[in-house]
Amino acid sequence: MNFGEFNNKFANIYNPILRFEDKSLPLCAAETSIYDFVRYPLLSFVQEKYILGSVINYTEANFIGSRSLFEVYGLLTELCEELFHCSYADGRTLTGVNTISTLLMSLFEIGDSIYITSPEYGGHSSMPKICKRLGIHVIEMPYDIENMDFCYDEINKKIKEKNIKGILVCLSDMLFQPDLSQIDLSSGTILIYDATQVLGLIAAEKLPNFFDTLPKDLPFILTGSTHKTLPGPTNGIVLTNSKDLMHQLDTKINPDYLRNIQMHQILSLIFCLEEFSIYGKEYMNAVVESSNALAKLLRDKNFDVINRNSVYSNTHQIFIHLPHESTHAFYMECQLYNITLNERYRKIYKDSGIRLGVQQIARYGWKNKELEIISEIFEMINQDCLAKTHSHYQEISNLIAQLAKDKHLKFTLDISNFLEFFVR
């Protein structure tokens, strides 16, 4: 393929992606934009370099020239200690699911029994499949749908009865953070909390940080992917204060389960954490305010917005119940207008509904005026779905185009003073 032919083929693929991004109304709870300050380290030449072994102590039998790379691990730990109050930070894993797979392989044996969160109540749908493939027996954590939290007395009773080796709390759908401090870990059961959806909210002190309440010697791991409420690269992170777990994980992650560490990803994550240390609290305040404000506006327009004691959300997510027969039609209407959201068929949505996320629009600085427009758009879409018409098509399209004119990321650092570090 000559370059001209390649250029044309690629343009035909990529230009529609750009047009969609420019015109979309981003309400997907799983997607977050990163700004140039965080994105620029991804261009660094260190993505071509290799380093093996521990993040705690430099491994001498290593690639020549890697000693300087090792210092990057220390800076990541320093920033994570400041934001998350942990003493061990490991950014070598590649995504959230890759992180959990690596932890499961490192900490458990074939035949071990662990508790996991049920997909029906917000649990990540990949976890049962991964555990089964690894030969780990899973038991779904009992859940109290009315209180939207786990049944801790029952969990603690069965931890000893069934010799539960670990607990994996991995929630994709989460309005309220579970109170994991109620879990009894005195028997040595390992608690892994995949906080992918809420890492930013924990770092900004909008949600409780279990490193502040659990004794340091308990086997607790806070982990997740770094690109939801934490606006970083698609990367994984593992955090703990347990010395036993530190040493159990440190040399298993690399070189046993990962070889080529993506150091440019870790640099990007470091820049994200520095940016977040300055703007994170302001940004996360905007996120929680936006989720509750938009939820109330939608409730006022007769949407069945799921809540707990009249509180709609402590996170970036909003759940709307829709009748089962209407959910997919509503989702397809949103697709017509490039409104990104998720359709869900789970008990936590009263069996069917949609999930919204406001982390992206909050970073645009959108407030009451824009949220009111979004609620009006949803109301018109719902009316058209019920009437099986597109009578509001032009009005909805005009409102989305109006919103799309103001997609400028806030809560960011200027990159100009840092470019020199990455130019060779």
Image (cartoon, grey):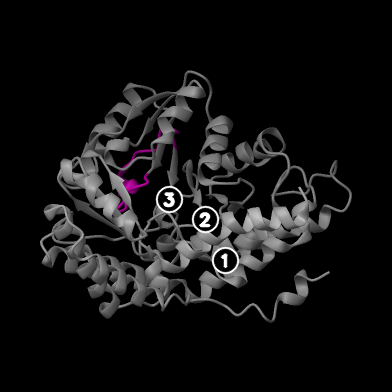
Q: What kind of residue is marked 1?
A: Cys
User: Do callouts 3 and 1 mark residues in contact (Cβ within 8 Å)?
Assistant: no
Q: Is residue 56 above or below residue 203?
A: above
User: Do callouts 3 and 2 mark residues in contact (Cβ within 8 Å)?
Assistant: no
Percent position of residue 194, x then y: 44, 46
Marker disc for residue 272: 1
Q: Name the residue rendered at 61%, 36% in the picture.
A: 248
Local secondary structure at mark 3? loop
Percent position of residue 267, x then y: 67, 61
**Residue segment shown in magenta:** 171-190
Left or right: where 389 falls relative to 374: left
User: Do callouts 2 and 1 mark residues in contact (Cβ within 8 Å)?
Assistant: yes
Q: What kind of residue is marked 2?
A: Thr
Magenta portion: prevailing SS class: loop
Near-viewer residue (19 or 296) = 19
User: Rounded to the nearest whole Å, what is the CA distance between mark 3 and mark 2?
Assistant: 9 Å
Left or right: where 267 falls relative to 316: right
Q: Is residue 162 above or below residue 228?
A: above
Label whose residue precedes the other's in the sequence (3 or 1): 3
- Reading the image, the residue beneath label 3 is 195
Near-viewer residue (50 or 106) = 50
Q: Foreground mark, 3 or 1?
A: 1
Percent position of residue 100, x then y: 51, 39
Local secondary structure at mark 2? loop
User: Local crowd at mark 2 within 10 Å, few (<14), some, or many (≥20)?
Assistant: many
Q: Is residue 48 above or below residue 405?
A: above
Marker disc for residue 226: 2
Q: Is residue 100 visible?
A: yes
Q: What kind of residue is marked 3?
A: Ala
How many numbered circles are shown? Answer: 3
